[in-house]
Image (cartoon, rainbow, N blue to C red):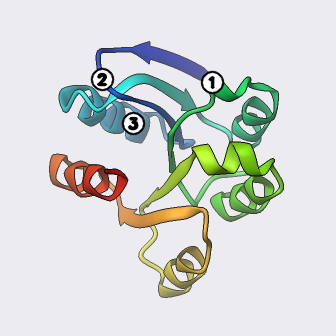
Amino acid sequence: MEVATKTKEGKKKVMIIDDNEIDIFINQKVLEFNNFASEIINIQAAQNAIDQLKSSKIEDIPNLIFLDLNMPIMDGFRFLYEFSLLSDEVRAKIKIVVLTSSDNSNDKEKVAANADVLTYISKPLTDQKLSEIASMLD
């Protein structure tokens, strides 16, 4: 399943970009359990996410993206570069949370230097981590 959308009562449109179906499932369940999102869009390839962001109307663009770093073909860092080329209007609407299994200090430094990234957290997403993200968004 390449793209799946789940609608729930909530407040934010969220996109999860991750090539691992189990991680997507876990992250989606945490978001649903916490009633965090009005819509959850799951995408398993970063290039597909970029293409969708480029072709979407501004009102259909997610407010928050959870981005994995380690993916085939286009990794999270390449996604961040491609994201930086999108319009200011699109970039201003979206906050990116890097949600990854990588604990590499170089990865953390590269992410910290990126103005489009809100924060870097380690998988799995938990209720506590989601609460911390929510407080950053308020």
Labels 2 and 3 touching (C-beta < 8 A): no
Q: In this view, does 121 lie above or below 8?
A: below
Q: Give the number of callouts.
A: 3
Element on which disc 1 rests: helix
Q: Which x, y percent locates residue 87?
A: 80, 47
Q: Which x, y percent locates residue 10?
A: 30, 23
Q: Residue at 34% of width from left, 28% of height from top?
A: 11
- Residue 115 left/right relative to 52: left
Pick the front one: 22 or 121: 121
Q: Considering only order in the chain, which callout, 3 or 1, is on the residue closer to the N terminus?
A: 3
Residue type pointed to by label 1: Glu
- Residue 42 left/right relative to 35: right
Q: Residue at 63% of width from left, 24% of height from top?
A: 59
Give me the disc on residue 10.
2
- Residue 9 left/right relative to 64: left
Q: Can residue 134 be seen in this view?
A: yes
Q: Considering only order in the chain, which callout, 2 or 1, is on the residue closer to the N terminus?
A: 2
Pick the front one: 8 or 57: 57
> Which quadrant of the figure contains the N terminus?
top right
Q: In this view, does 67 lie above or below 40?
A: below
Q: Can residue 73 be seen in this view?
A: no
Q: Which x, y percent locates residue 19?
A: 57, 42
Q: Circle 3: is it few (<14), some (14-19), or many (20+) Cα within 10 Å?
A: few
Return the residue at label 3: 22
Return the residue at label 1: 59
